[in-house]
Image (cartoon, helix red, strand yellow):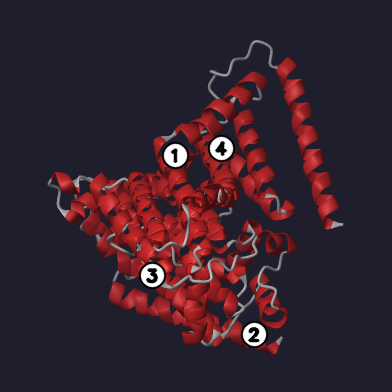
Amino acid sequence: MKNIRSKKMVFALTFVLALAFSITAFAAGEETAEEVSRFYMTPWSLLPPVIAIGLALITKEVYSSLFVGIVVGGLLYSNFNFEGTLNHVMSGGIVASLSDAYNVGILVFLVILGIMVSLMNKAGGSAAFGRWASEHIKSRAGAQLATMALGVLIFIDDYFNCLTVGSVMRPVSDKSKISRAKLAYLIDATAAPVCIIAPVSSWAAAVSSYVEDGNGLYLFIRAIPFNFYAILTIVMMIFLAVSGLEYGPMAKCEKNAKEKGDIFSSMKTAAENVDDKGHPNGKVIDLVLPIAVLIVSCVIGMIYSGGFFEGTNFVDAFSNSDASVGLMLGSVVTLVITIIYYLVRRIFTLKEVTECIPEGFKSMVPAILILTFAWSLKAMTDSLGAKQFVEAVVKSSAGSFHAFLPAIIFLIACFLSFATGTSWGTFGILIPITLGVFPLTNPLGVVCVSACMAGAVCGDHCSPISDTTIMASAGAQCDHVLHVSTQLPYAITVAAVSFVAYLIAGFVPNAFIALPIALVLMIATLFTIKKVMKNQ
């Protein structure tokens, strides 16, 4: 019944949009697509992502919801002109996103990782690792802690983190009857939140690029103790694993996994993702070696893109690196080495290797499609001046209440990152504004920059159109909307405590005081939730 209603809703929405197109095509008259949108730099500029996110949560259909958001953005940009909307959606949105060099590099990286995962599964490496882990990891808590540990160790890049941790830990979590929704949360929560407090990461490079005079890395390191959302997210994951606390929609998924062995809580997902046992002679090394080579190759690829082999020192090379180029080159090298290794091991014939290539590509098609639509939606939002609108709002109110500014910036960054699905874009908007209000020598300025980073990660963590959220779903092979809905209560809990911590840090900008208070508040909140859940 729910599916029928959902289909009717989507059909009705499509019909209304088609009717609107038909009407505006004739009503627009001589209006041209080049005319400046009357919605530019207004609150309406945030409408497309709000509609896309709302529809995704209501209808559970992420593709159609994203596309409707893109169309709404095109309508607003062209002042409801049919020709202008069609051109902007296709040329300025989808085609522009797929022709962007950075985006193409990420898509190549995704496809190659999909191929590698297919190879590792067929080689029996994943199954062998699952058998090894089942002998050494005896509890659900141990499996969750092992997943977190691997996520923390792979701090180089969030995309790399999501897909690598997912492919390695799926057999382990399945053996321990951990739901795919919980695995997706653990992957997502150790991706961006870990990268944003790791000085040697693509995120540190991105943040550093927004700070002038070469002080970016210095500011990034100073801001780490004030990045409450990232730190408290890690604390929360550990508490959940050790205590067994679950609440919200996640509790139902975990109950299904523990009591019924249903790790998917979704028949569609369960039917599509049946793991292959792989080659009977597969060994743990068949999984570990390609992953190790991938880590080394990607690090080398990133410092290569930053000019390390042209004389630049390691830190500067990482700060100047292009994550898209580095990850793409590293994954290509790894794929070649992996294929050669499997051929030498006589696990595969060359024909079997080539058969894995389309299989790996097909496994990444859902993630690629969602990413393409998410990038296109961001292009719509950018063309409507959403960044400039938010920037103007922040600048107009920055000077009136300095002590409350960290908490306010945290909320703005959360909303902006949630609506646009990008942390890095949020950094680019808010960090320069913050540094314009506070000099680097002002402790409150460091707190505000950290609040910007924390809020951006929080919004990115919650948003269904975020790259990282999409990657976490793909890495865990979990239904995307299920992943978003189950992790949202956990992310909101940490965000609420972080907001209070930034209120305190605004008056006491000292990490030795503010951080311990934040930790105590987080643990007290979790114990309170556990007590409430126990009494229900």
Residue 392: give x, y in percent of width and height.
43, 40
Q: Is residue 365 above or below residue 83?
A: below
Whole-number angstrom distance, CA of label 4 to CA of label 3? 37 Å
Q: Residue furthest right?
A: 1
For label 3, the crowd category at 10 Å Cα-Cα, with few meaning under 14, some 14 to 19 and many 20 or more, is many
**Viewer-proximal residue among 128 and 54:** 128
- Helix, strand or loop at label 3? It is helix
For discs 4 and 3, the disc positioned in front in the rendered view: 3
Please, what is the three-letter code of the amino acid marked with disc 4?
Answer: Ser
**291 lies left or right of 178:** left
For label 1, the crowd category at 10 Å Cα-Cα, with few meaning under 14, some 14 to 19 and many 20 or more, is some
Determine contact: label 4, label 1, CB under 8 Å.
no
Whole-number angstrom distance, CA of label 3 to CA of label 2? 31 Å
Q: Is residue 443 at all visible to an observer of this figure?
A: no
Residue 338: give x, y in percent of width and height.
39, 57
Circle 1 residue: 104
**234 lies left or right of 67:** left
For discs 4 and 1, the disc positioned in front in the rendered view: 1
Circle 3 residue: 152
Please, what is the three-letter code of the amino acid marked with disc 2?
Answer: Val
For discs 1 and 3, the disc positioned in front in the rendered view: 1
- Helix, strand or loop at label 4? It is helix
Q: Which one is earlier in the sequence, the residue at label 4 or at label 2? A: 4
Q: Residue furthest left?
A: 311
Please, what is the three-letter code of the amino acid marked with disc 3?
Answer: Val
Residue 45's disc is 4
Circle 2 residue: 532
Determine contact: label 1, label 3, CB under 8 Å.
no
